[in-house]
Image (tube, grey):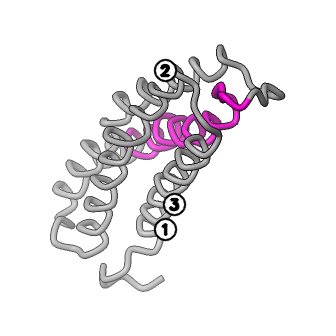
């Protein structure tokens, strides 16, 4: 059972979290801007990236669910790296739900100043950095009592 949970957790992370992270990073590059700088911008690509961001985020819920079940099965729920990972995962979800996805929607509805897209890119960078830290925690497992 642990192998199945770990496989679902890792594959879900790669496909759904990774896909969402890539889509959030690429969106500002393709989103329409009011400045008239249309070079390299494509509304249809931006729409697809917005859909990927939202859809993969929903499917990505399997990652923390499988991770929590796996941690419980393995008796690791009290370990600090699990707690910090859960907090960072909640932070990433909050960023995606309250900042990134709504800002993408707004950018598609009414193209604005390029500064808005740069801000969105910065927020997306924090989102991706959060996931990078979670991955490092999953590999290093500080405080787990296991030697590297």
Q: Quadrant of the N terminus?
A: top left
Horizontal and vertical percent position of residue 97: 32, 38
Task: Assign a secondary structure to mark 2.
Answer: helix
The 10 Å Cα crowd at callout 2, few under 14, some 14 to 19, many 20 or more, is: some
Horizontal and vertical percent position of residue 114: 65, 40
For the stretch drawn in magenta, the main secondary structure is helix
Q: For the residues carrying marks 1 and 3, which lies nearer the camera in this image? A: 3
Residue occupying the point 53% across, 44% down: 120
The 10 Å Cα crowd at callout 3, few under 14, some 14 to 19, many 20 or more, is: some
Judging depth in this view, the residue of 108 and 34 nearest the camera is 34
Horizontal arrangement in the rendering, residue 143 relative to residue 105 (left or right): left
For residue 25: magenta?
yes
Residue occupying the point 53% across, 42% down: 21
Q: Compared with residue 47, is residue 137 higher up or lower down, i.e. above or below?
A: below
Horizontal arrangement in the rendering, residue 62 relative to residue 75 (left or right): right
Spatial CA distance of label 2 from label 1 is 28 Å
Spatial CA distance of label 3 from label 2 is 21 Å
Disc 1 marks which residue?
Answer: 136
The 10 Å Cα crowd at callout 1, few under 14, some 14 to 19, many 20 or more, is: few
Give the residue furthest to the right: 39
Horizontal and vertical percent position of residue 100: 44, 40
Disc 3 marks which residue?
Answer: 129
Task: Assign a secondary structure to mark 3.
Answer: helix
Judging depth in this view, the residue of 147 and 113 nearest the camera is 113
Tag 2 or tag 3, which sits nearer the N-term?
Answer: 2
Question: Magenta span covers which residues?
Answer: 8-35
Disc 2 marks which residue?
Answer: 51
Residue occupying the point 41% across, 27% down: 54
Spatial CA distance of label 1 from label 3 is 11 Å
Residue occupying the point 17% across, 65% down: 77
Tag 3 or tag 1, which sits nearer the N-term?
Answer: 3
């Amino acid at each position: 059972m642990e192998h199945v949970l770990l496989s679902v957790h890792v594959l879900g992370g790669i496909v759904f979290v990774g896909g969402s992270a890539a889509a959030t990073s690429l969106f500002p590059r393709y989103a329409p801007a009011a400045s008239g700088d249309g070079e390299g911008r494509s509304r249809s690509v931006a729409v697809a990236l917005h859909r990927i961001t939202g859809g993969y985020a929903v499917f990505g819920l399997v990652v923390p669910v499988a991770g929590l079940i796996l941690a419980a099965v393995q008796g690791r729920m009290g370990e600090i790296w699990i707690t910090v990972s859960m907090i960072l995962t909640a932070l990433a979800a909050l960023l995606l739900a309250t900042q990134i996805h709504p800002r993408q929607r707004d950018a598609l509805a009414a193209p604005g100043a390029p500064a808005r897209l740069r801000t969105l890119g910065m927020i997306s960078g924090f989102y991706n950095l959060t996931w990078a830290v979670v991955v490092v925690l999953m590999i290093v497992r500080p405080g787990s009592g296991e030697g590297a």
